[in-house]
Image (cartoon, rainbow, N blue to C red):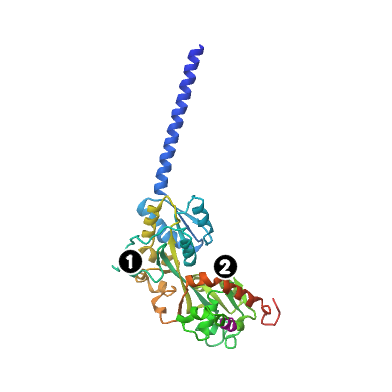
Amino acid sequence: MTVNIRRKLVRGVVAAIVLHGAAILSTSAQAQQIGTQADLTFSSFSGPYMRSQMLGFVRPFEDATGTRVFVEHYSGGINEIRNQVESANVVWDVVDLIESDLLRACDEGLLENLESVQLPDGNDGTPFREDFVEGALHKCGVGMIVWATAFAYSNDAFAGEAPGNISDFFDTKKFPGARAIRNDPTVIMEWALIADGVAQDDVYEVLETPEGVARALSVMDVIKPGLQLWKNGTEPARMLQNGEVVMSSVWATTGSVAADKPGAKFSIGWDARVIEVELFGIPKGTRNKKAAIDFIRFASSSESLARMAGYHPNGPARKSSLKMLPGDVLARLPNNPDKENLTTIRSDAVWWSKNHAALQEAFDAWLAERGRESPSGTVR
């Protein structure tokens, strides 16, 4: 084979490789472009809660639109959102945020403004701005669920009358035994003031004063002997079931599901439950903003939120969704209209964002003071 012929063949092979490579790159770029337009990443909490979202609106949204939704787990907070936004590498398109995290992220400019987004009206015709519960529509977020912290009590520890209101949580003479609370000043300090006669609408005004903080801690002194602390939401059910405590604060949905299981040895008390809202937010700078808004519109509809509640009893953030649910599901929801006659505390996320650090310091000092004695007097 002559040198010229060899050179022509080599040039032909190289040209074919280059063309083939260009075709691959072109196809890859096209696929990437289509994927970017169609795919969506939703970040949320795990467990039965995430399952209720998957079945309530993630899979139905995929079926209705053809959009693929990738679901990622996170443990709350805004650090990851901040990292993504500040590095211009936003990979989460929609995030499930508790209200306090959403407020902080919004204040830091980490979330898209959603004020102009038109959401679907309620399936009963109620305009959407009237259909969502208090606090569920924010300039950076759209409400999804209403959840609460309630108290739970042992079914076997007390003879006769069972605990019925939050004052009973602090009545260790009538209802003796160890208590458990979350290792945090929220909820327990509101409860202490309610038990001491403060009106529910005045709780935060009183708690903002040094005298109010001292008053709450004084009420809490009676439950210090044998006090247990929990962090994970499944711990209260375990402690009650094993007889380690006779009463505990508990996340209402997790607690009510556990209390309904065969062989459960505890019940939920709904008086003075502390209500909170959870919302959808969109990290600022997502390349899929339109698809993210479409997802939120679908996921926050009356039907989607009712369907989600049917799989896991968190209260839907729409009033019209409540009307769609059967009685057995409604009975387990923290915002069941039948519970409106009970004392209800709407957690003030803005207030806590300003005061949490100071009250955490007071709470920690209270825990450390004189130690925590067990019912037998032994310091833990």
- The quarter of the picture where the C terminus appears is bottom right
Residue 120 lies, in percent from the top left, at: 32, 62
Task: Say whether residue 62 is visible.
Answer: no
Residue 239 lies, in percent from the top left, at: 60, 74
Q: Amino acid at mark 1?
A: Phe
Q: Residue 232 shows which numbered tag?
A: 2
Badge 2 density bin: few <14, some 14–19, many ≥20, Cα 10 Å: few
Badge 1 density bin: few <14, some 14–19, many ≥20, Cα 10 Å: many
Depicted 297 relative to depicted 162: above or below: above
Q: Amino acid at mark 2?
A: Asn
Q: Nearer the viewer, residue 211 or 55?
A: 211
Q: Residue at x 51, y 13 (%)?
A: 3
Q: Nearer the viewer, residue 289 or 274?
A: 289
Foreground: disc 1 or disc 2? 1
> What residue would you read off at disc 1?
128
Residue 161 lies, in percent from the top left, at: 52, 87
Residue 206 lies, in percent from the top left, at: 51, 81
CB-based contact (under 8 Å), mark 1 and mark 2: no
Q: Residue at x 46, y 28 (%)?
A: 18
Look at the numbered disc 1 and give the secondary structure of its residue. Answer: helix
Q: Nearer the viewer, residue 201 or 318?
A: 201
The residue range painted magenta reads: 214-219
- Report the side of 74 relative to 137 (left or right): right
Asked whether 217 falls inside the magenta stretch, the response is yes
Look at the numbered disc 2 and give the secondary structure of its residue. Answer: loop
